[in-house]
Amino acid sequence: MFKGIAASPGIAIGPAWIIEEQHREIPRRQIKPSETKQEVLRFRQALGKARQKFLSIKEKVAHSLGTKHSLLFDAYNLILEDEMLRGGTIKVIVQEQINAEAALEKVTDRILKAFSQVSDQYISKRGHDVVDVSRTIMSNLLGSEKQVWASTNTPSIIVAHNLTPADTIDIHKEKVVGFVTDVGGATSHTAILARSLGIPAVVGMKDITRRVATGDTLIVDGIRGIVIINPEQNVIDNYTNEKVKLEYENEQLAKLKDLPATTLDGRTIEVFANIELPSDVTVALNYGATGIGLFRTEYAYLDQDNLPGEEDLYHVYSLACKRMLPYSVVFRTLDLGIEKVDPRYMLTPERNPYMGLRGIRLCLANHELFKTQLKAILRAAVEGNASLMYPMIATVEEFRQAQEILEQVKEELRKDKVQFDENIQVGMMVETPAAALSSDVLARECAFFSIGTNDLVQYTMAVDRVNENVAYLYEPYHPAVLKMIRDVIRAGHHAGIPVSMCGEMAGDPALTKLLIGLGIDQISMNPHAVPTVKQHIREIKYEDAQTFADEILTITDIDEIRKRLNIK
Amino acid sequence: MKEKTFTVSDPYGLHARSASLIVQTIQSHKGDVWITVDGQSSPVANGKSIMDILILGATRGTKLKFRVEGEDEEKILSEVEALFLNNFNEDSRG
């Protein structure tokens, strides 16, 4: 069993189909003058074939994903027909008297060099599009097409080091049931496309291509981010059952999309989604989320070598706000460790980054970084319905300092006559035991609480869940954790502020009744968990849930708690 | 000859999809269009070449000067302007 990043939910079971990275020798030879015409013709034919391929992919994409995704292939065809590539290659064949493959390679390198001189990191990556196009022409020239999995008859799970946009999309949906890649993250191209195609995917598996052979039976668990190679029959049976159940449930749950998350006795809980890209808004809405309870803002800081500017962030945030209207978006300010924003720390990382300079601590130590983001959020809030919250708060002083900086930022915006949301609501994450235990004090300062359970559990149990030696201690059902959650909710309500929860516990249907019983006002989770949780809410009575919660909180034994919550 | 300058507003700069919309717009007319980064004399991109345009390396905030020569000068500029004003329809995309 191997763990990667869950990139697209669902379960796939089937044979693996390995897409090899091609490292084929490119023939280089001088040609005779009499061969020139033939060589140019070969190149033109390869070009024509590539054009046909892009056109047919474009059509497929437009059909399955909508025109918005298909435009990339227009760009591919323009690159293909561009004088620089087409004319350039023909010129090299004729003038240097070399074969088409060698000429194409030479011209591609030349173009890439021109791209690499573009100073902007992001733009210079555009060279990838040219490489994609060039590779397609090259494989046509070399005669053997890249192994096309569409030629298999059994629905297969694609295993590859990486998939280019063209790879990902050049598929017969009925013949591909899952994706597994060595590289990539939850926001990589493969992941986004797999999600929109509704095909389960696990990415970031490091060296899975070396561990799997074509034909091996795989289970892709796109919910837990797990891949199992050649599983035992009983494992296959279990997963098959889960898969069938899941598919049936999804059908049923789709019907819930527009229904409110209201208990049988009339208490409505807001069910929100956690996202990190504006494009995920559509996914969240499709699953029936009525708000974004956690917009993770770290993505913009990881993807680029330079820190993003205010305008970059404003664009992303305002897009999310606009798309989510009339619903609201809660932006969590930067929750990164120092090593991610200051390259000097990559060499001498902190010994214990999770207890180091991260989250609000980092922002309070780096005002410029913080102010840039706050400005972008304040401005974007004009475009929709936004609020913000600070992560990792441990003391009330931290919250006050952050608020002071926010006031400074507002003052600066006022001075510059920039439009912003004067009355933005500011909440905080409750994810350190210190914050949970002083929630009564903190509740008087902020507009809402959002309990971040992943960190709260880790810090409460003093366990790094990634450390296999102690991962068993990562125990969300521990009475200490449950008590803390109860007390935070009480403190919030006592001060008259709403209490929300984001993190894995919020999306765990086994906990829904308990959380409702404890009085949680909003729960925010991965979009795909929304329908299930909503259904649970619609099937319970708030009154019963309260009694249930009271009972659970009196139990001191974890196993007993698990049993009562029906956890395996 | 007519000239007009437009500012790139996409946070990811002028990428392949937007560049292809510019090229398609310009290719549908007979007139020639030459694009430079405002304030620079080179490189000069042929508005009918996507590669030329991409190599300009226009990031967010870059001002691009479009110089149109030949037929339909006004029409080309107004169509290009519409693309920039609508941020190449990026905002409405998923």
Image (spheres, coloured by chain):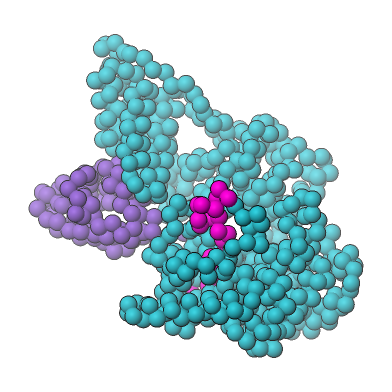
Chain colours: A cyan, B purple
Residue A303: x, y in percent?
A: 48, 53
Residue A79, quarter of the rendered image: top left
Q: Locate residue B8, reporting x and y percent.
A: 30, 58
Vertical relation: A140 (above or below) A265? above
Above or below residue A332? Residue A82 is above
Q: Could you say which is closer to the camera, residue A402 or residue A58?
A: A402
Residue A476 seen = yes
In the picture, measured across the screen, residue A13 lies left or right of residue A304, that is right
Instruction: Using residue B47 as the reference point, say whether residue A481 is left or right of it.
Output: right
Q: A338 or A153, which is in the foreground?
A: A338
Residue at 47% x, 41% y is A166
Q: Is residue A253 found inside the magenta-colored segment of the image?
A: no
- In the rendered image, residue A541, in percent from the top left (x then y), is placed at 77, 80
Does residue A126 appear to the left or right of A497 in the view shown?
Answer: left
Q: Residue furthest front?
A: A348
Residues drawn in magenta: A325-348
A138 up-or-down from B22: above or below? above
For residue A199, above or below residue A31: below
| Residue A322: quadrant of the picture | bottom left
In depth, the one of A106 and A237 nearer the eye is: A106
Quarter of the image with the C terminus of chain A is bottom right
Residue B32 spot, x, y in % from top left: 16, 46
Q: Where, by quadrant of the figure, is residue A49 drawn?
A: top left
**Residue shown at the point (44%, 58%) measured from the top left:** A307
Q: Quadrant of the N terminus of chain A?
A: top right
Q: In the rendered image, is residue A9 in sight? A: no
Residue drawn where x is 31% and y is 38% of the image: A114
